Every structure is written in C-alpha cells, then in structure tokens.
C-alpha cells in the first residue's frame, strides 16, 4: 500500500499509512505482551489455592459481595444439580465463617447470593466458586453495601 501511494506521488497518504502501520505494530506488541503476562499470571495463581481464611467480618473490615450464579439454561436442572454435587459446590460454598445475608432465586437468571465477609477473604470465595460452580453456573460479582437505613431515612424525610 505504502509503495503504491509513494509511486503515485501522494506523500500525505504515505504518511498516513506509515502512521497506521506503526500504530498497528505497537498494538500487536502490546497484545503479545499482555498475553505473555496473562499466561504467567494464570500459571502463578493456578498453582496454589488460597488458604482457608478464618477472619470474621467486623464493622471496620466487612464488605458485602453479591454473587450472580447464572444457570446454563441449555441443560436440565437435574443435570446442573448433579454437576454441582460432583464438584462439591454445597459442601464448599459458602466457606466457613462467611455470612450469607440473602440467597434467592431470580427466575430467568439463577441464584443471587449476598455475602458479608472481610475483604481479605474475597479471593477465597472466588476460588471456591471457580472450583465448584463453574460449568453449571456463570458467575458475576458485585461489591455492594447496605443502603436500607439511608434510603428509608430519606423516604421519611421526603414524606414530611
């Protein structure tokens, strides 16, 4: 391409093409670096599961974590439950000492679980779900917080 534009005497187009090729080369190099770094990170993190934590949630370290367990709707429920049993889901989740604030079924989505735990145990919860829920569920994680008292106070204030 560059040669064609140069032969036609189009220096502006040649300059533009050179910038495009240079940008593409930089992007390719960055992607290769990210893939290499990601592979090393995956190997490092896959090597050892996190230790089972014993830290308990306190007012100064507690976080709420809402987990969406989206079920695979292409498979029958009996098959999903059998897979969860084989993988030890209900034995491992939630980890000991992690408080379940709520655990509901949202039709069309799956299960929605809100946990209260120390921030230091988030990795442990994630690994338990990776090891026992994947395949039957796709997981999504959302840090959340309790807004009920604030929301109700605002509601009462507005009602006056």
Image: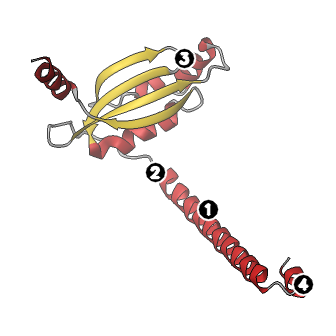
Spatial CA span between label 2 and label 1: 21 Å
CA distance for labels 4 and 2? 61 Å
Q: Are marks 4 and 2 in contact (CB under 8 Å)?
A: no
Q: Earlier in the sequence, mark 2 or mark 1?
A: 1
- Say which residue label 1 marks: 35
Horizontally, residue 48 falls left or right of residue 22, namely left
Q: Nearer the viewer, residue 7 or 75?
A: 7
Q: Earlier in the sequence, mark 1 or mark 4?
A: 4
Classify mark 3: residues with Cα within 10 Å, few (<14), some (14-19) or many (20+).
Answer: few
In the figure, is residue 105 to the left or right of 71?
left
Task: Mark 2 vs mark 1: give the one in front.
Answer: 1
Label 1 residue SS: helix
Please state the horizontal and vertical placement of residue 15, each as a whole percent of the image.
73, 83
| Residue depicted at x 42% and y 23% | 112
Residue 52 shows up from this direction:
no
Residue at the disc numbered 3: 108
Q: Secondary structure under badge 3?
A: loop
Question: Distance of mark 3 from mark 1, alpha carbons?
Answer: 35 Å
The disc, 3 or 2, on the residue closer to the chain's N-terminal end is: 2
Label 2 sits on residue: 48
What's the residue at 22%, 40% (across, down)? Answer: 55
Rounded to the nearest angstrom, the CA distance separating label 1 from label 4 is 39 Å
Look at the image and tell me whether residue 157 can be seen.
yes
The mark lying in front, picked from 3 and 2, is 3
Q: Secondary structure at mark 2?
A: loop
Asked if labels 4 and 1 touch by Cβ distance under 8 angstroms, the answer is no
Instruction: Say whether disc 4 or disc 2 marks the residue closer to the N-terminus.
Output: 4
- Position of the C terminus, as image quadrant, is top left
Q: Residues within 10 Å of mark 2 (few under 14, many from 20)?
A: few
């Amino acid at each position: 391409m560059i040669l064609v534009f140069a032969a036609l005497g189009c220096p502006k187009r040649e300059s533009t093409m050179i910038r495009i090729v240079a940008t593409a080369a930089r992007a390719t190099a960055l992607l290769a670096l990210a893939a290499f770094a990601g592979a090393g990170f995956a190997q490092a993190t896959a090597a050892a599961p996190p230790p089972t934590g014993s830290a308990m949630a306190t007012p100064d370290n507690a976080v709420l974590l809402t987990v969406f367990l989206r079920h695979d709707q292409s498979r029958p429920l009996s098959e999903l439950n059998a897979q969860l049993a084989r993988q030890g889901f209900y034995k491992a989740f939630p980890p000991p000492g992690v408080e379940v604030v709520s655990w509901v079924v949202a039709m069309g989505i799956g299960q929605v679980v809100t946990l209260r735990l120390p921030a230091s145990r988030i990795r442990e919860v994630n690994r338990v779900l990776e090891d026992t829920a994947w395949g039957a569920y796709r997981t999504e994680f959302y840090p959340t917080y309790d807004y009920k008292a604030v929301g109700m106070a605002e509601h009462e204030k507005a009602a006056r």
